[in-house]
Image: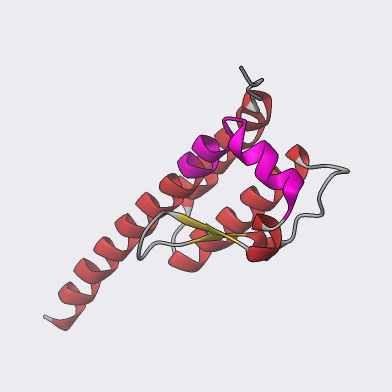
């Protein structure tokens, strides 16, 4: 049986302020910036000293399959693959991404309502 790694302490550190900032975001660009900052910080903490994390390594993907996209550079790293496959990291990244996407959807829906009211 393989040892399963847990990154709960990192999640508890980053998620409460992330959720608060996301809920206060007023534009789609705000959401993307908050997500980029949080995901960069989250992965940098986890892979400190092992892998250099760049802002393009984890991208929000509101359209299409999946909530996020991992860069080819990161996917080709053996250390990343090992941790990704043997930990709770995928679930945490998914929660982070889904939270951001839900806020994006909310903002887009309300933006359409606002535009419709202005046109009348």
Residue under the point 62% across and 40% down: 84
Residue occupying the far right of the picture: 49
Q: Residue at x 48, y 49 (%)?
A: 97
**Which quadrant of the rendered structure holds the N terminus?**
top right
Quarter occupied by the C terminus: bottom left
In the figure, residue 33 lies in which quadrant? bottom right
In front: 36, or 92? 92
- Taking the view exactly as shown, the residue that stands out farthest to the front is 1
Side of 113 where 31 appears, left or right: right
- Could you say which quadrant of the image residue 59 lies in? bottom right
Residue 66 visible: yes
The answer to whether residue 40 is left or right of residue 104 is right
Q: How many marks?
A: 0
Taking depth in this image into account, of 15 and 9 the one nearest to the observer is: 9
Q: Is residue 61 magenta?
A: no
In magenta, the rendered stretch is: 77-95
Residue lying at 49% horizontally and 58% vertically, measured from the top left: 31
Could you say where residue 35 lies in the image, as x and y percent from the top left? 56, 54
Q: Is residue 94 magenta?
A: yes
Q: Position of residue 46 (x, y in %)?
A: 74, 38
- Residue at the spot 36% in from the left edge and 50% down from the top edge: 102
């Amino acid at each position: 049986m393989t040892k399963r790694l847990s990154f709960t302490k990192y999640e508890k550190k980053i998620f409460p302020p992330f959720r608060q900032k996301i809920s206060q975001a007023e534009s789609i660009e705000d959401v993307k910036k908050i997500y980029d900052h949080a995901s960069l910080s989250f992965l940098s903490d986890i892979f400190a000293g092992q892998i250099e994390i760049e802002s393009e390594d984890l991208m929000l993907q509101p359209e299409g399959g999946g909530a996020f996209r991992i860069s080819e550079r990161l996917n080709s790293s053996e250390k990343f693959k090992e941790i990704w496959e043997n930990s709770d990291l995928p679930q945490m990244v998914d929660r982070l991404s889904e939270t951001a996407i839900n806020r994006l959807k909310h903002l887009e829906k309300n933006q359409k309502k606002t535009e419709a009211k202005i046109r009348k």
